[in-house]
Amino acid sequence: MRNFPVEGAGLGLRRSMMGEEVPSGAVDFFEVAPENWIGVGGRYGRWFREFTERYPFILHGLSLSIGAPEPLDMELVSSIKQFIRDHDIRFYSEHLSYCSDHGHLYDLLPIPFTEEAVMYVAERIRIVQDALGQRIAMENVSYYAAPGQEMSELAFLKAVLEEADCDLLLDVNNIYVNSINHCYNPFEFLRALPSERMRYVHVAGHYDEADDLKVDTHGAPVIDPVWELLNKAYEIHGVMPTLLERDFNIPPLRQLVEEVEKIKNIQASHQVEENYVLSRR
């Protein structure tokens, strides 16, 4: 039996949602970027505290920059550790990428897919896990170039997870986007990932720049091929907590809740199938 930090279907909490009422039972958990909330007071701070007292929360960081050439920001890690304690946060994840080099670069850049990078990144993940006193998950990220590539994205991701002994935040939209941009089979990629390391899932929308170029924006509804990939993820790896991301072009909360409900429906369909199989044994 795998241990998940939360259950059901979740939503990324954004400040623009302040003042909107979450329908009862519509959202099982929320996620925020700690960098956007650490040290926030006033009405936003009070509003956030009300939510963390009512719902389970997980963190998805933006600026740990795990693959950066510069030293880790241990002050940030310390602040995140305290934030986790202050708000009883269930889990923390980050991007398997980097976003700084003697200054913030304001983008998530790809780590070279090399054995040297595997060892470098894994050591930094272990340092963060030791400092936090808990396991963390790394997210498979979207990327648009692969500088210095010596191994496949899949081989690199699996090697980092194994060497660091950390968990995986599975982003199915990123698999879809990368499969188009880099011409691989998303279902084969998904099937090859380690079920035992998966802790939760992201789904999101993206932008179609061209037939062969998709941009991961989190600024649109989830499309049917991504829903299909989520369905396949449950079929292969079992039902997992799943969160809807939306970072701009954010519609009214009721529209986001409709997408969260779609997650719940897909989860329920697989749970019915699992219960039927068990009852036939």
Image: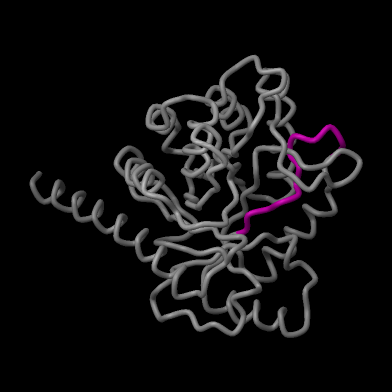
Residue found at the far front of this picture: 210
Name of the residue lying farthest toward the left = 280
Using the image, determine if residue 145 lies above or below residue 41: above
Residue at the extreme top: 150
- The image shows residue 135, relative to residue 35, as above or below, that is above
Residue 108 x, y percent position in the rendering: 71, 42
130 or 44: nearer the eye?
44
Q: Is 231 in front, or is 133?
A: 231
Q: Which residues are magenta?
A: 59-71
Q: Position of residue 262 (x, y in %)?
A: 35, 61
Q: Name the residue at 57% across, 41% down.
A: 209
Residue at 76% in and 42% down: 65
Left or right: residue 33 compared with residue 235: right
Q: Where is residue 272 drawn, in percent x and y?
A: 20, 55
Is 70 a magenta residue? yes
Quadrant in the rendering for residue 218 = bottom right
Left or right: 137, with 100 as reference point:
left
How did the renderer colour the structure?
one colour
Which residue is at the front of the view, 222 or 49? 222
Q: Quadrant of the C terminus?
A: top left
Whole-percent x and y of residue 102?
91, 41
Q: Is residue 86 magenta?
A: no
Q: Main secondary structure of the magenta part?
A: loop
* Residue at horizontal 42 percent and vertical 32 percent from the top: 186
Q: How many marks?
A: 0
Q: Residue at x 32, y 37 (%)?
A: 236
Q: Is residue 85 above or below residue 96?
A: below
